Amino acid sequence: MPWQDNNGAADGSLHDGAMLALLDTTGAMACFTQTGFTAGRAATPSIQAQVLAPLPRADVEARSRVAFRDGDLFWSDVEIGVVGKEEILARGTVVYRIVPPK
């Protein structure tokens, strides 16, 4: 996610809300790699996040994988860091539900 001033917090770091939006979207996209994009319904019933260090004023990237699936529920683990660096600054788990069309 490229840095944008409107995603910044008062202290100059990435705002937690922007970080959570990236975490949620990345976790959801990992689920769709297993189902394909369908015309069904999808939602995030639960999200858990840990900010390990402030996310600096920089471009950030997220990586995700589906850790577990139970029918239409998916648990995706997500890690967020600065583009080009290996350090993980935030991580979390997204529980995502994809209900296929009838």
Image (cartoon, helix red, strand yellow):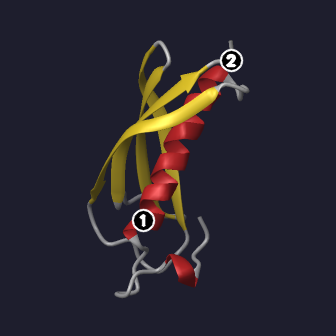
Where residue 86 appears, x then y in whole percent?
Answer: 43, 58
Is disc 1 surrounded by few (<14), some (14 to 19) or many (20+) residues within 10 Å?
few
Residues at circles 2 and 1 in contact by the CB criterion of under 8 Å = no
Where residue 101 is drawn, which disc sits there?
Answer: 2
Where residue 75 appears, x then y in whole percent?
Answer: 40, 29
Q: Is residue 70 above or below residue 21?
A: above
Which residue is nearer to you in this view: 23 or 97?
Answer: 97
Q: Earlier in the sequence, mark 2 or mark 1?
A: 1
Q: Quadrant of residue 1?
A: bottom right
Instruction: Write the residue at 57% across / 32% down.
Output: 42
Dot in front, 2 or 1: 2
**Amino acid type, residue under disc 2 in the picture:** Pro
Q: Is residue 37 above or below residue 18?
A: above
Where residue 17 is drawn, which disc sits there?
Answer: 1
Where residue 32 appears, x then y in whole percent?
Answer: 62, 30
Camera sees residue 94: no
State the count of labels.
2
Q: Is residue 89 left or right of residue 80?
A: left
Instruction: Write the residue at 55% across / 71% down.
Output: 59
Where residue 33 appears, x then y in whole percent?
Answer: 63, 29
Instruction: Write the residue at 51% across / 76% down.
Output: 7
